[in-house]
Amino acid sequence: MCPKWNVEVLKPKHQQILKDPLQTIQDKIKHPVGSPSLKQIVMEKGHVGKVCIVSSDSTRPVPSHILLEALINELNNYGIKDTQIIILIATGLHRPSREVEHEIILGKKLYGRIECVDHVATDRNNLTFLGKSKTGIPIYINKYYLESDIKILTGYVEPHFFFGFSGGCKSIVPGIAGASTIQANHSAQLIASENSRFGKYQNNPMYSNSMEMAHIAGVDFIVNACIDENHQITNVAVGALEVAHDLLVQYQLKKAFSPIKRPYDIIVCGNGGFPLDLNLYQAVKSMAIGEMGVKQGGTIISVNECSDGIGEENFKELLFSGMTPKELHDKIVQKKILVPDQWQIQVLTRVLQKADIYLVSELRKNELGNIGLKYARTVENAISKGLKKHGPDAHILILPHGPQIIPHFIQ
């Protein structure tokens, strides 16, 4: 960085990592919050034929193998055999996992030992209809999960750009829900809500719908974690769905949000590295982080490797639709465009109406579509372009760690 630039760097607040996360999780499984212990749950079920453990997919940086190993160690201790356990990967509408990703998710001790399957949101044969939510959303949930005697969720909690926070009920919807359920809860109208933003969850319509549907599907137990910028576990909550999740939400509200005195001319941000920066689809989340702190008419520089390319096919088609950000955003909100993954374009076009967005990645210029994303070869090159627009004294904010730290400006 040039020493003459007016630069500030916002780093995550310190979080103490767990010295022995495996043992910590196993201890908390024995002494959960808001719930009987997992051993009591198993004993009260009487006969247990199948246990389903839902795990995050490869686009999430949570060290799932530790959460899974702790759970399976305990289940084995209670007489549950490996053959009775299935790991269900909560892919939502993401692509299926690759075999090497299954190995990473399960870890060396569990890979090849425990059955592992991907959820497929478009496969009606593997979905069960549970009726409709209070707001009329059709509830389709993975049948492997519903047919299990014990249902356990794992995941991690961090700020999410329209759910408020990840983790908890999000493992059910969108994690293992049918495509029509996901699309209804990710509608343009709900995405457009001012309460569908980073850090907002109590009045967030998407979170509320998801929690209702999770209770309908049934959740016996959850193991959720928080991680630092190096993806090491800093906190764990185990037990009842809402109680355990809320403990980590309160922790993140203290750790992940930082007040800023003014909006910035230029913000440099990313998703926090692999695997969150796998593709352009996921990179939109970093642009929404930039939106939180950039001024109207400012510049966001999104730095994400995008080694997996653009991402979901519908997202790619809309990215190359040739419309202006406003035209595309309005058509989505007015329900003139109704396709899976429209929500990512909706957020992208909303941010594009506030600021210029430069992408620094492995993608070539001709892969960035034609709706307004700008190409830059390096961060320095993008900043230089921003300085030409905003002047040499422009205020620049660097956010190097994705959702680990969210700028928070209140007028």
Image (spheres, grey):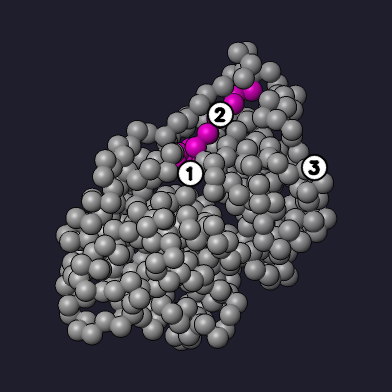
Magenta-tinted stretch: 394-408
> Which is more toward the observer, 95 or 20?
20
The amino acid sitting under disc 1 is: Pro
The amino acid sitting under disc 2 is: Leu
Sequence-wise, the earlier of marks 3 and 2 is: 3
Sequence-wise, the earlier of marks 2 and 1 is: 2
> Which is more toward the observer, 137 or 304?
304
- Residue 365: mark: 3
Is 69 drawn above or below residue 13 in the view shown? below
Residue 116: percent from left, percent from top:
45, 69
Crowdedness of circle 3 by 10 Å Cα count: few (<14), some, many (20+)?
some
Please identify, in this view, whether the residue under mark 1 or under mark 3 is nearer the observer.
3
Locate residue 330: give its quadrant.
bottom right
Please identify, in this view, whether the residue under mark 3 or under mark 2 is nearer the observer.
3
Specify whether residue 403 is painted magenta.
yes
Residue pointed to by mark 2: 397
State the separation of the CA atoms marked 2 and 1: 15 Å
Q: Residue at x 16, y 72 (%)?
A: 40
Residue 213: percent from left, percent from top:
41, 75
Specify whether residue 347 is painted magenta.
no
**Residue that sits furthest to the top in the current view:** 4
Q: Residue at x 30, y 37 (%)?
A: 16
Please identify, in this view, whether the residue under mark 2 or under mark 1 is nearer the observer.
1
State the separation of the CA atoms marked 1 and 3: 26 Å
Secondary structure state at the residue bearing disc 2: strand
- Residue 403: mark: 1
Q: Answer yes or no: is residue 208 visible.
A: no
Is 318 drawn above or below residue 87 in the view shown? above
Quadrant location of the N terminus?
Answer: top right
Is 182 drawn above or below residue 9 in the view shown? below
The amino acid sitting under disc 3 is: Lys
